[in-house]
Structure formats: structure tokens, C-alpha cells
Image (cartoon, grey):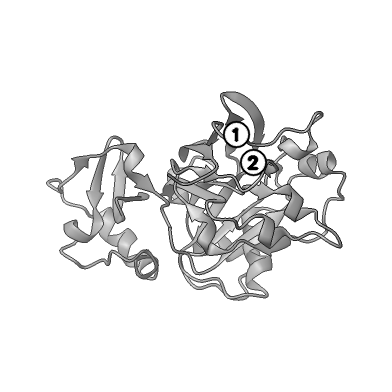
Amino acid sequence: MRLAMAKDRPVIVAGGVCLDVHTASGGRFPLDPVQLFERWEQLLSWAAELPADAAWTPFDPEDLGAPMPTPRQVFALAVNYANHADEAGASTPDAPLVFGKFPSCITGPFDPVVLPSDRADWEVELVVVIGRRAEHVAEREAWDFVAGLTVGQDISERRVQFRKPGPNLAMAKSFPTFGPTGPVIVTPDELADRDALTLSCAVNGERMQHANTREMVFTVAQVIAAVSANVALLPGDLIFTGTPAGVGSTRQPRRYLAPGDVITSEIQGIGVMRNPCRTHRS
């Protein structure tokens, strides 16, 4: 299943058409995304038995917003690709390095990224969406708690991030619009290999990042096990799983996002986001 939000309404997407979940279910499933994810298993069962005459309608991809716009918690991983650790001059961690992004940063796949300074940087990432409450989850069972996967950008303001006396990841990565996600949430069964997805990022058509999620230091299952050992994961929560090499702050010369730039982020089997950069929202 491929779930999206079209004009603030949950829809199932199939090719160039979509199905309004609330309307097609006769109101059985709510419009509120958090409440919808709390009924994720029921939604999957209902979607698997859709009638042939279901009211599928064409839609404009530009109408899609963040597929989970109001997560209660957003987690992220630092240095979860060895090549990113190398370019940053950092050591590969012995355990997942987890920090938080504040949920107010989450935006959609075609929304503008508002630049607060001349030091904003791109980071394409696979994002995991949690489907049911998870506490002390064993690695072998971790995928059972995943609703689906989507594309994300962990936009980062590097001055704030590296301000002395120490890194401030949560603040640097939580400016409004610093969490584009989308265009859809894809259930793992739709993917040929959920642990080996090609991801890439381009700025103005120039490829900056290209990797495969099999290169992650810690797998999705390992990350879920590690996070749930300390924090209860809730339905609809997001986990940004880290970025590969190719960010702007490690290039020579360094390169950062500027007004007018367009960030294109893509993950195999999930979709493409295009986010223009501005100094203001409108």
C-alpha cells in the first residue's frame, strides 16, 4: 500500500489515481493522521479488500503534503553511513547515535525549504514510519512495528550545529521546513528488498549524494531495537535513518543551499521530492 496526504486528507495512491480513505470507508477511518496510524492494522486489512468499484480519482502530485504531517516524536541518526563519517572526519559509532528533530519542522515533498542563513545544508535520508507502539523490541521483530517507509531531507543549519562548546543537532535540524518528507509512505511488502534501497540527492540537477541503504552502519531493525530500548515509539512516529556522503559542508569548496536552489531527493521504490529554497514561505 502507498499512503499519502492530499489536501490534508489521507489517500491510498495507485499510479495516477487515489482513493480518499475517510470517504471510501464510510467514515470508519479518521482524517486525523495520528488517529489513523493508531488503527494501522485495521487500515491494512480494509485496504486489502477494496471493492472493484471503489471511487478512485485522478490527483495532482503537487497536492501531496507530508504523508505523516503531525508525528508526536521524530528521531534521527547521526553518522549512520561509514562514508559520511569519513568525509566528516568522525569515527563510525559503536551504537546508534540518536537525536531528536522537533515535529514542527516537518513539511511536504514539494514545499519550500525556508533558509534562515547562508549555511543550510542538504541530507537525503530514508525515513521509517512506526505503525504500532514499540517498547524493548527485539531486532528480529523490529520490522513488525514498521508501517512503511518514505523519503526525507534532514536539512541542517551548520553554524548552529557546530557552535561551541558542543554540537547542537536538535536546534540545527529543527528550523521550520527543515524536515521535508514524502511523497508517500510505502509498506515494506511493496519493496523488492526493504534493506537495500538506492537513495540520491541533487541540487539544481547536479547529483550530490548517491548510495544504498545496505551501506547503513545500523540497519532499520537495529535502529528500532536501540531506540525502543530507551523510548516508547508511538504510531506515526518518524525515524530519519541517517545520510550518506556528499553533504555540502564537507565539500572543497564548501557549498550550501541558496535562494532559488531546488533540492531533488529520491529513493528507489518510494518516490521523488522536489523542494525549492527560499528566504521566506510565500
Residue extending furthest toward the left: 53
Mark 1 or 2, nearer chain start: 2
Disc 2, SS: loop
Depth-wise, is mark 1 or mark 2 nearer the camera? 2
| Amino acid type assigned to the residue bearing label 2 in the image | Trp
Question: Callout 1: few (<14), some (14-19), or many (20+) C-alpha neighbours within 10 Å?
Answer: many
Q: Nearer the viewer, residue 179 or 118?
A: 118
| Amino acid type assigned to the residue bearing label 1 in the image | Cys
Disc 1, SS: strand
Q: In which image quadrant can residue 81 be found? A: top right
Res. 143 in view = no
Q: Position of residue 253 (x, y in %)?
A: 80, 29
Q: Nearer the viewer, residue 203 or 265?
A: 203
Asked if disc 1 and disc 2 are in contact, CB closer than 8 Å, the reply is yes
Question: Callout 2: few (<14), some (14-19), or many (20+) C-alpha neighbours within 10 Å?
Answer: many
**Residue annotated with mark 1:** 201
Q: Position of residue 259 (x, y in %)?
A: 57, 35
Please state if 55 lies on the left or on the right of 92 as rendered. Answer: left
Res. 59 in view = yes
Disc 1 to disc 2, C-alpha distance: 8 Å
**Residue annotated with mark 2:** 122
- Whether 253 is drawn above or below 267: the answer is above
Write the residue at 44% across / 63% down.
70
Q: Position of residue 209 (x, y in %)?
A: 66, 33
